[in-house]
């Protein structure tokens, strides 16, 4: 199975799981396709696996739902953008992190914090293709734009 098919399957499974938890879309105003941009900042790495996985799951699910998504990796989370690191991450009963990140990269933006990358001596050449390195000015510009919802994990 190729990566795109695998990623699509994981995201569909994630969305199916969310729907099976109960259809409360009417009360939340969610009708299938999101019109706002979602900016997610992940501040935890493998040291806090549930928080890390939850942020990436929400990002991939939002991409699958049609939202514009920007996922920022900061602190120890930046290691997930290094090839092979997400594949080594395991959390029982969770979708594979590498597949979720691939979904975000396929339909959204993945960004590593400038200072965090420098402290770890990482450059864009060290990161997954399509990942950018940007700092506080870019993050601030994204979260202050009209129609943006920012979430920090």
Image (cartoon, rainbow, N blue to C red):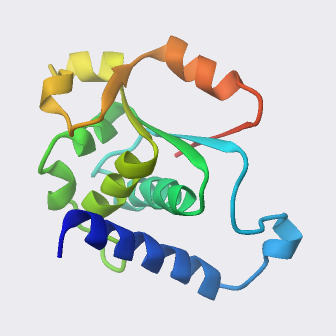
- Furthest residue in direction right, as rendered: 27
Residue shown at the point (14%, 26%) measured from the top left: 125
Q: Quadrant of residue 116?
A: top left
Q: How many marks?
A: 0
Residue shown at the point (43%, 16%) measured from the top left: 135
146 up-or-down from 60: above or below: above
| Residue toward you, 150 or 132 | 132
Side (left or right) of 19 relative to 53? right
Side (left or right) of 14 relative to 152? left
In percent of width and height, residue 63 lies at 52, 55
Side (left or right) of 99 relative to 67? left
In percent of width and height, residue 65 lies at 59, 62
| Residue toward you, 76 or 133 | 133
109 up-or-down from 57: above or below: above
Residue shown at the point (79%, 73%) measured from the top left: 25
Quarter of the rendering occupied by the N terminus: bottom left
Q: Quadrant of residue 112?
A: top left
Side (left or right) of 97 relative to 23? left
In percent of width and height, residue 143 lies at 65, 28
In percent of width and height, residue 89 lies at 21, 60
Q: Evaluate whether residue 113 shows in this view.
A: no
64 up-or-down from 114: above or below: below
Q: Evaluate whether residue 111 shows in this view.
A: yes
Residue shown at the point (30%, 33%) measured from the top left: 131
18 up-or-down from 115: above or below: below
């Amino acid at each position: 199975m190729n990566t795109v098919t695998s990623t699509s399957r994981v995201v569909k499974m994630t969305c199916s799981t969310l729907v099976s938890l109960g259809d409360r879309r009417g009360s939340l105003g969610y009708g299938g396709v999101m019109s706002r941009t979602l900016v997610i900042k992940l501040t935890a790495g493998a040291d806090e696996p549930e928080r890390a996985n939850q942020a990436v799951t929400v990002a991939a699910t939002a991409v699958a739902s049609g939202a514009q998504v920007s996922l920022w990796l900061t602190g120890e989370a930046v290691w997930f953008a290094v090839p092979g690191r997400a594949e080594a991450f395991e959390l029982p009963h969770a979708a594979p992190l590498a597949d979720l990140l691939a979904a975000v990269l396929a339909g959204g933006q993945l960004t590593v914090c400038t200072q965090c990358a420098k402290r770890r001596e990482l450059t864009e050449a060290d990161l997954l293709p399509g990942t950018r390195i940007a700092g506080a000015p870019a993050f601030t510009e994204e979260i202050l734009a009209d129609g943006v919802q920012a979430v920090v994990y």
